[in-house]
């Protein structure tokens, strides 16, 4: 344990993400977690004494939530680099955007190990950043939404098993945090809050979906902007967190809600993400922040590097260091935007703010969630 964890967050990372790809045509062909770690170091923001390598989780640890036969199927898929028809049909391995790839077992087991370690490291208080975590769609016995294991669930269970009684899970990924909500739907110790694009896969998380009272969902319209995020935070999410009086907060900080992401139609800047981090980081004695979705390496990398800066009260400069700029210029992104990237993706870390009109449906979402949350 660090002597003053509130002032000295820890960073849990791993080299397993470097060069790991779901395949050349998959949205997760891009470098993300390695980019964040490299940017943080290139900016001079990393005290190596605070970097901890994520361990691979044990089978016993992940089967606290996941089916042992499913975990064994993931291991078989990595060992053989194939999947049988029975495993594909039953576990959705090699199907529905969940490909067989080189580290199909070791990578999710490392993400899970890193998040569970983060939970243990914060038991006495503190903050841990684990950008490789955030696989919020994983199901007990099947892959879903590019997620093979559900590391947020495993991290929260680590807290609960250690005796914590009140946890908030806040998810700002563009996609609904369905796997986490469903895992704790009958557990009033865990309040799940999800801000996500309405009508987007997995087509869950309607505003009226309360999961037995343990969830509040904010399905926002396309074009959701920074001003609208502030209204949701101020008028609903922060009051709900205060009302729950959490012992710990788990923030899934998916970067696919940023305007330049190819898999959503939201319009946030990374200022909105950093604002959420700043707003919640002192609301409970324990905090874990993870990554999540994010399918543009420039915008995800810059956003998540700034999350670490926010957690450490480091001002983000107008221009990155020469080493950080060189790193950004070296990235490869094979979508159209990556073949002709705008110059500011190289020369800034902070996006221009994306303010705009706060639409009536945003205020209605906030009012409805807060009213029902306070009366629950």
Image (spheres, helix red, strand yellow):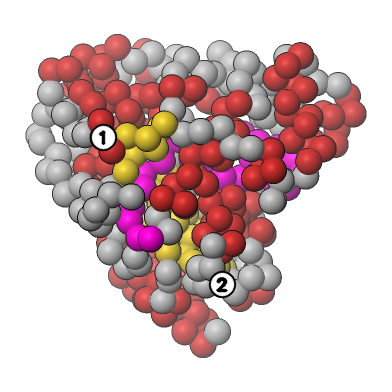
Q: Which residue is mark 2?
A: 189
Q: Which residue is mark 1?
A: 49
Q: Identify the element where label 2 is drawn.
A: loop
Q: In the image, which residues are magenta?
A: 124-151
Residue that sits furthest to the left in the current view: 318
Q: How many residues crowd around disc 2 within 10 Å: few (fewer than 14), some, or many (20 or more)?
A: some
Q: Nearer the viewer, residue 305 or 218?
A: 305
Q: Position of residue 178 (x, y in %)?
A: 62, 53
Q: Nearer the viewer, residue 285 or 262?
A: 285
Q: Position of residue 151 (x, y in %)?
A: 56, 45
Picture layout, residue 275 above or below residue 339: below
Quarter occupied by residue 170: bottom left
Q: Identify the element where label 1 is drawn.
A: helix
Q: How many residues crowd around disc 1 within 10 Å: few (fewer than 14), some, or many (20 or more)?
A: few
Residue 256 visible, this angle: no
Q: Position of residue 154 (x, y in %)?
A: 59, 50
Magenta highlight: main SS: loop
Quarter of the figure with the C terminus: bottom right
Q: Is residue 371 left or right of residue 88?
A: left
Q: Nearer the viewer, residue 139 or 72?
A: 72
């Amino acid at each position: 344990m660090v002597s003053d964890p509130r002032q000295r967050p820890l960073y849990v990372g791993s080299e397993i993400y470097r060069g790991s790809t779901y395949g050349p045509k998959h949205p997760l062909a891009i470098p993300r977690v390695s980019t964040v770690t490299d940017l943080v170091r290139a900016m001079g923001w990393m005290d190596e004494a605070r970097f901890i390598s994520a361990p691979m989780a044990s089978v016993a640890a992940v089967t606290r939530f996941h089916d042992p036969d499913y975990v064994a199927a993931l291991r078989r898929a990595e060992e053989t680099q194939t999947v049988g028809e029975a495993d594909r049909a039953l576990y959705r391995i090699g199907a529905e955007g969940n490909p067989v790839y080189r580290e199909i077992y070791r990578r999710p087991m490392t993400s899970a190990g890193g998040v569970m370690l983060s939970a243990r490291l914060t038991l006495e208080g503190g903050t841990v950043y684990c950008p490789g975590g955030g696989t919020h769609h994983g199901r007990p016995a099947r892959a879903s939404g590019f997620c093979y294991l559900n590391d947020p669930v495993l991290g929260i269970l680590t807290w609960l098993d250690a005796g914590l009684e009140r946890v908030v899970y806040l998810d700002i990924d563009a996609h609904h945090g369905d796997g986490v909500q469903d895992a704790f739907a009958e557990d009033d110790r865990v309040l799940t809050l999800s801000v996500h694009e309405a009508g987007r896969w997995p087509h869950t998380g309607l505003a009226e979906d309360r999961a037995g009272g343990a969830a509040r969902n904010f399905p926002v319209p396309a074009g959701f902007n920074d001003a609208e995020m502030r209204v949701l935070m101020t008028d609903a999410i922060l009051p709900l967190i205060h009302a729950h009086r959490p012992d710990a907060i788990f923030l899934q900080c998916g970067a696919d809600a940023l305007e330049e992401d190819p898999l959503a139609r939201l319009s946030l800047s990374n200022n909105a993400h950093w604002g959420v981090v700043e707003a919640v980081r002192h609301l409970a004695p324990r905090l874990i922040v993870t990554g999540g979705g994010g399918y543009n390496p420039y915008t995800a990398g810059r956003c998540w590097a700034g999350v670490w800066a926010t957690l450490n009260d480091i001002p983000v400069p107008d221009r990155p260091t020469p080493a950080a700029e060189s790193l950004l210029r070296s990235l490869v992104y094979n979508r159209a935007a990556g073949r002709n990237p705008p110059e500011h993706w190289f020369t800034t870390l902070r996006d221009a703010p994306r303010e705009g009109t706060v639409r009536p449906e945003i205020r209605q979402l906030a009012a409805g969630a807060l009213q029902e949350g306070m009366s629950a």
